[in-house]
Amino acid sequence: STDRSAAIAERFRASRPQIFRVLRQTNRGPSAARNAGLALAQGTFVNFLDADDRLDRNALRRVQRFFARHGDKVDVVTLPIERFDARQGPHPLNFKFRQGSRVIDLAVEPDSVLRHTAASFIKRSALPDRPFDEDVRYGEDALAMLRLLLERPRYGVVQGTRLLKRSRRDQSSLVDRLYDAPEHLEEIVRWHA
């Protein structure tokens, strides 16, 4: 990385070596980085938070409580997304949170598609060893999530907390440039065909 993220990560690791590990590898894209991190993960649940996104302070507590109540029914729990910076406000897919915290069955609510891993917490045991396809250039997280939900088409939604997702003014984010731009929809579909 050309920014200071490696130095920042090393400071976290030095402050709490029993919790933080730093993995350095040749840049092979986000799928390879996520797969490598997942191979080191030891927790019951995993999340793939993007570097410039944030969780509300109560997010982990609310997710843990939801899994404690409904963990026998779901492998994935997700949060509403609130965009900040260049674009602000709720994400268009937040409609699924209008009925409160609950379990969504995709057989009953097929329009409640879930594609974000940054806002989602996943049981480590539900994931294959390498869930992110390293040949997929963009949208690898959506593809991994869809494959996971094909196996067990239910997930939890938790209200009262959120993921804060940066929308960059310079459009240096793939999400800002591609995924949220309607003119790229056909290209994205071809990547996943």
Image: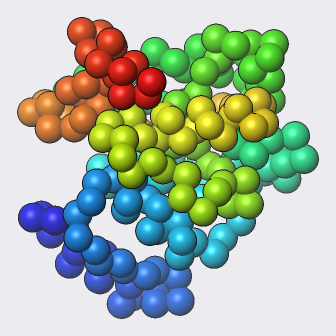
Which is more toward the observer, 177 or 99? 177
Give coordinates of residue 178: x percent, y percent: 25, 25
Q: Residue at x 75, y 46 (%)?
A: 75
Q: Quadrant of residue 186?
A: top left
Number of numbered markers: 0
Q: How is the image coloured?
A: rainbow
Look at the image and tell me in which quarter the N terminus lies.
bottom left
Which is more toward the observer, 116 or 164? 116
Q: Residue at x 29, y 83 (%)?
A: 11
Q: Is residue 133 visible?
A: yes
The relative height of residue 57 versus residue 139 in the rendered view (above or below) is: below
Give coordinates of residue 167: x percent, y percent: 26, 32
Q: Residue at x 37, y 62 (%)?
A: 33
Give coordinates of residue 43: x percent, y percent: 66, 70
The relative height of residue 180 versus residue 49 in the rendered view (above or below) is: above
Q: Is residue 85 visible?
A: no
The relative height of residue 113 versus residue 81 in the rendered view (above or below) is: above
Which is more toward the observer, 48 or 35? 35
Look at the image and tell me in which quarter the C terminus lies.
top left
Q: Is residue 42 left or right of residue 131?
A: right
Q: Residue at x 80, y 23 (%)?
A: 105
Q: Is residue 90 left or right of residue 2?
A: right
